[in-house]
Amino acid sequence: MTISLCMIVKDEESVLSRCLSSVSGLFDEIILVDTGSSDQTPAIARRFTDKVFSFPWQDDFSKARNFSFSRATGDYLFWLDADDVLPPPSRERFPALRALLERERPDVLFLPYDTAFGEDGTPSLTFRRERVLRRSEKAHWVGRVHECIAPFGKQLSFDLHIHHLGSRKERKDRNLRIYQKWAAEEPLSARDLFYYGRELYYHRLYPEAVARLEEALSSDGWYVNQIEACKILSLCLEEQGRLPDAECALFRSFLYGEPRASVCCELGRLFFAQKRFREAAFWYQSALSCRDHSEEGDFELPAARTLTPLLGLVCSFDALGDRERAHTFHERTEALFPDHPAVRQNRAYFSVQKSN
């Protein structure tokens, strides 16, 4: 049983060596597809593999990734981005991953993807990606941006983390330009409308973002994306000064599944900003009771179930004049996050209150 690592790269000289060094010796072959680098990326790639190919960039990530898959010969295809790494614990678990593939013969293997990190380096945002695919016609990328592979056949998960460390490369409006061109050529799926709307929000194009997100929500999309679309729609409406509509967008997310902690925290924040402190406290308390949905693919920081609502409750009860309950929630927060700047600030605040 063999595993091919497949990557597409362009102008990644600052990070490619870091990535390939982290996986050195793990794969049976490494397929590197360069989509038009003007730096030393191809030369760096050749230090690690002799299977370096060129593919003209066509404003379509799926085309490039599918080309990389087409050049692979392994039984399984494993993909990475140039700004990803396998941390040492994942290297140690790689033989166990091989054994799982050999024993279970899955079609799709999901691995955890760590994309944000705390000050101590601990992952703060993790979600699963379809990382290892059995080589077949069904292992086919779709989507010009935020590309994915529709899961097929026997699907398993395995606890081997990939760290997405990012790079300093400027990407500016690349994704937005691709979406604008794509939308002008053909109708977009609910998934792509969601990502297009999110990209418009990032670029502060709020009216157009609202229109695209409403289109996404009127389509039959994946419930996780629909919940996220409601959250981003709310932010767009808030930026336009439409606070009641922003609240409604968050409540709308409840149509697609259990309330998410991040939605409850956003409701708490909106109500607090309007000095509706009792309602704010209700939603912050609700966030503490929400389940972790990361296994379903949610993009949600764990802090939405702990730090954020606890701090919100401190502020809400203090604003209501209930210093005792505010201090109680401060103590809970302090026990979990003693060194957080907001906790230190609250510690000083309550110390002054006590002395008065």
Image (cartoon, rainbow, N blue to C red):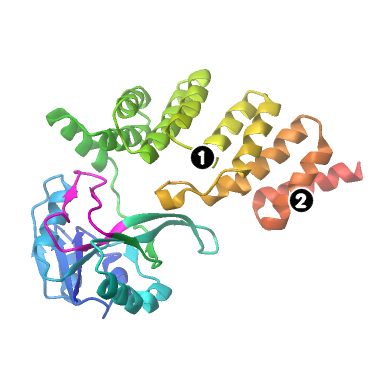
> Which percent across, then down, holds residue 294?
45, 51
Identify the residue at horizontal 15%, vertical 28% (top origin): 184
Residue lying at 37% horizontally and 26% vertically, measured from the top left: 206
Sooner in the amino-acid sequence: mark 2 or mark 1 = 1
**Residue on which the image places disc 1:** 260
Q: Is residue 81 visible?
A: no
Residue situated in front as seen by the camera: 125 or 176:
125
Callout 2: SS: helix
Element type at mark 1:
loop
Can residue 10 be found in the magenta stretch? no
The residue identified by callout 2 is 331
Q: Which residues are magenta?
A: 130-154
- The type of residue carrying mark 2 is Glu
Report the residue at 32% width, 70% height from top.
18
Among the 4 quarters of the image, the one containing residue 9: bottom left
In percent of width and height, residue 236 lies at: 42, 27
Q: Is residue 170 left or right of residue 328?
A: left
Majority secondary structure of magenta residues: loop
Compared with 272, 145 (above or below) is: below
The amino acid beneath tag 1 is Arg
- Residue 341 appears left or right of 236: right
| Residue drawn at the location 39% of the way across and 60% of the way down | 112
Tell me residue 301's x, y (percent).
Answer: 50, 49
